[in-house]
Image: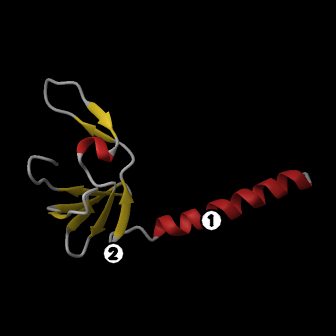
């Protein structure tokens, strides 16, 4: 193998290793902060609406507390809302949260 290929493989390994280490720590045992990038709002028989958090009066960041089973969001007007998480499950390495409040799920 040429020195350039070995160097490229080493750089890729160095860049990927920290990401894999961080991803392994995501098991629901610690609170997380999530950024809402895009929202899709769909209703039966209607077209889906897409936008950013502000478009739907939704917090841009959510704190997920798995121990207390809560989502906490701070709105643009500084109002803080806490919503319950009804169920947490793991499927194929993904954490899935279930819950609804005020007609939103």
In the rendered view, tell whether residue 71 sits above or below residue 53.
below
84 in relation to 49, above or below: below
At a point 14% along the width and 47% down the height, the residue shown is 104
Instruction: Examine the image and state in which quarter residue 46 appears.
Output: top left
Outermost residue, left direction? 102
Label disc, if present, on residue 83 of the rendered structure: none
In the picture provided, is 83 more to the left or to the right than 4?
left
The secondary element bearing badge 1 is classed as helix
Label 2–label 1 contact, CB within 8 A: no
Q: Residue at x 37, y 69 (%)?
A: 27
Q: Nearer the viewer, residue 41 or 14?
A: 41
Q: Position of residue 11 (x, y in %)?
A: 75, 59
Locate residue 68: give its quadrant. Answer: bottom left
Nearest to N terminus: mark 2 or mark 1: 1
**Callout 2: 10 Å neighbours few (<14), some, many (20+)?**
few
From the image, tell me which residue sits under label 2: 29
Q: Residues within 10 Å of mark 1 (few under 14, many from 20)?
A: few
Residue 40, quarter of picture: top left
Seen in the image, is 4 located left or right of residue 83?
right
Q: Is residue 81 above or below residue 67?
A: above
Question: Foreground: 1 or 32?
Answer: 32
- Name the outermost residue toward the right: 2
Residue 79: percent from left, percent from top: 21, 63
Query: At 22% from the left edge and 62% from the top edge, which residue is drawn?
Result: 88
| Image coords of residue 77 (percent x, y) | 24, 58
| Residue labelled with disc 1 | 17
Left or right, residue 93 beside residue 84: right
Q: Between residues 88 and 100, which one lies in front from this camera angle? A: 100
């Amino acid at each position: 193998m040429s020195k350039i290929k070995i160097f490229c493989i080493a750089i890729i390994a160095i860049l990927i290793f920290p990401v894999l280490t961080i991803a392994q720590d995501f098991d629901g045992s610690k609170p997380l902060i999530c950024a809402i990038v895009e929202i899709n709002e769909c209703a039966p028989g209607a077209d889906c609406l897409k936008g950013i958090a502000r478009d739907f009066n939704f917090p841009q960041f959510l704190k997920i507390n798995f121990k207390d089973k809560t989502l906490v969001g701070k709105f643009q007007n500084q109002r803080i809302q806490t919503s319950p998480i009804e169920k947490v499950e793991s499927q194929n390495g993904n954490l899935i949260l279930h819950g609804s409040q005020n007609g939103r799920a």
